[in-house]
Amino acid sequence: MNKTAIWVLALPFFWLTSCHKPRSSKNINKSAADTTVASIPVAADTAVISISAGDVDSSSATTKTSTEAAAPLAVKELQFDYLVAKSKFSFKGRKQDFDNTNVNIRMKRDSVIWMSVTGIGFEVARGIITPDSIVFIDKIHKDYFVFTYEQLSKQYNFELNFPLLQAVIVGNMPFGQQPDARFVKENDFYILKQIVDRLEVDNYVAERTLKLSRLLATEVPTQNTFTLDYEDFRDVQGSLFPFVSQIMLNVRSGQEQAVNQTSMRLKHSKVELVSASPGFPFSIPSSYKRKR
């Protein structure tokens, strides 16, 4: 694996945060004067659902008119102390293509995300992400990278934060659900529509499981899109967890506005939720050179 491949795990998070500020998130319950999503017409075969936060039986839902507000729906989020996963990562972009790179992930909720990337029988990179910084060691080239969220925000003109990274990895909602959130019922999904600064975000929540299954984000000025699909849900110690995450980025660039497509897949072979720390070994050899 070359140096570029070490960073591809972070690409969807960087794009997703590049055009929003989390503290200013808004939902569809704004008036039509304040938001464009509120004025999007509802298709004839859809209905806005009114359902209490504790009621997960769709048969008890009461159909309202498309303009009537709905009470919050309790989307199920993964709760954990520590997480350990063995995974394979695949990437396909304009200049790079590789399959099934081995990645070991360890997490402490709200504190640490630890990653180890392995090649043929040996570790090629290791990273540790905390609420304060992101550090990666490149063992092939014997150098390392240190970033703060403030530095990344200035460099890429976006706000990156630890809670967002954590949410994407474990299958929770990347953009927090507002207390007065409204959902549109469409086929087997409840769709939460949100405006997050320049993003129009559709969260597809499965009716049967009340888990986020798909997120579609569109940047209004550019029409760049980010699609995240969670698949192969399995029971992990009483909680449903997506063992496959499919990510697709479509970004327009150049005067011709050519669309550059990037696809990524994270496929877990094993996921454990544990109560004791699995350990997060991380040190930088003195001989390694800091690249930034």
Image (cartoon, helix red, strand yellow):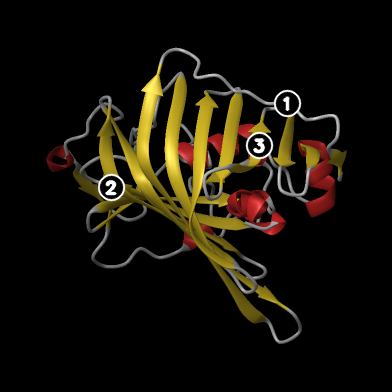
At mark 2, the secondary structure is strand
Which residue, given by chain and number where applicable, does mark 2 sit on?
206
Q: Which mark is residue 283?
A: 1
Q: Position of residue 100 (x, y in %)?
A: 46, 56
Q: Position of residue 54 (x, y in %)?
A: 26, 26
- Furthest-top residue in this view: 276
At mark 1, the secondary structure is loop
N-term-proximal mark, 2 vs 3: 3
Q: Is residue 51 visible?
A: no
- Furthest-front residue in this view: 121
Which residue, given by chain and number where applicable, does mark 3 sit on?
127
N-term-proximal mark, 1 vs 2: 2
Vertical side of 265 occupied by 107: above or below: above
Number of residues whose C-alpha sits closer than 10 Å to that of mark 2, classed few (under 14), some (14–19) or many (20 or more): some
N-term-proximal mark, 1 vs 3: 3
Q: Quadrant of residue 199?
A: bottom right
